[in-house]
Image: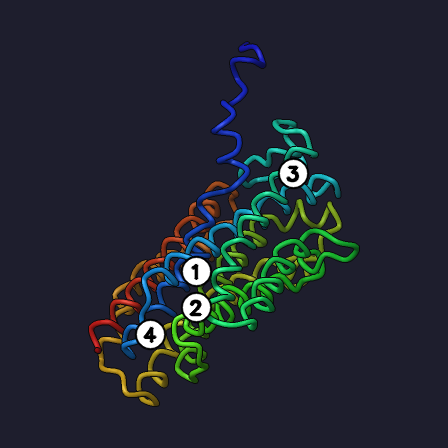
Amino acid sequence: MSSPSLSKPSGLRIWLMASRPRTLPAAVAPVFVGTALAEYQNQFHWLRFVATLLGAILIQVGANLSNDYSDARRGADTEDRLGPVRVTAGGLVPPRQVLIATYVTFALAVLVGVYLIAVAGWVLLAIGAASIAAGVLYTGGPRPYGYEGLGEVFVFLFFGIVAVAGTYFVQTKTVDWQAFALAVPVGLPVTAILVVNNTRDIDTDRRAGKRTLAVRMGRERSRRFYAALLAGAYVLLVPTLLAGDFQLWLLLPLISVPLALRLTQTMFETSHGPALNGVLAGTGQLQLAFCVLLSAGLLLSK
């Protein structure tokens, strides 16, 4: 048997685990789409793009740290959890250090936000504040909305609508219906990521008193919801193409349909934790591929 000193990960490894880098594509991919639409309309600013990307990463990492801390305090992260190890519940980092890291990360996001407010206006203050609040209150606060089955709604709003339209606004200082039209299919696969996560955790969440949407719906209906989200993302590209002045390049994300079909098949065929972890990772890859292809389609349509 190895000693604790040998089995414990290094400090850097622990903080990487806490920041959950595998979740970052969900935060940055919508930024690509909003920026690509701005470039399609000949309104692109490199520094604003970099700042928006950095701000999205910092808010996501801050939210991950906050959730790690809050779930541990509420006793939601138990030993039989099927997902990645949480550093607070696992005793790898004292809760106070995780909380301080959360504050520091959000403070850095605010500093980036100051620049974005300066170049795009005070509306960015409301967007940034709402995004941080949504990240914290997912599992924090007196009544975390993630425990009441509202997680998917907020993920769709903030990783779809707010992320794409907000990024577009940073670049152009205007609001365009096309940004909102593109934000809807972008928000659907990222919502599917949370559906997989919560479907995998149905049993442990139910025991912990977390009434996620998957707990409320049950495993079978959650699977159908997952399939509907992925299908909707592709189907909605067609009316967006027909309503706008885009070219057929907008349908480039259809290249990723085979991956979506494989993930959906696995989702329906298994309830095994490790297999669903694979679907979770694959759905994250699908969402990134969908957004990159959609961004490329916008640029090629120019």
SS label for mark 3: helix
Q: Is residue 229 visible?
A: no
Q: How is the image coloured?
A: rainbow
Q: Is residue 250 visible?
A: yes
The three-letter amino acid code for the residue at tag 1 is Thr
Residue underneath mark 3: 100
SS label for mark 2: helix
Residues at circles 2 and 1 in contact by the CB criterion of under 8 Å: yes
Residue underneath mark 4: 37
Q: Residue furthest front?
A: 118
Q: Earlier in the sequence, mark 2 or mark 1?
A: 1
Q: CA gap, disc 2 to disc 1?
A: 7 Å
Numbered mark located on residue 167 in the image: 2
SS label for mark 4: helix
Residue at left 70%, top 60%?
145
Q: Nearer the viewer, residue 251 or 87?
A: 87
Q: Nearer the viewer, residue 117 or 186?
A: 117
Residue underneath mark 1: 52
Give the number of callouts.
4
Left or right, 285 with reference to 210: left
Q: CA gap, disc 1 to disc 4?
A: 15 Å
Q: Residue furthest right?
A: 142
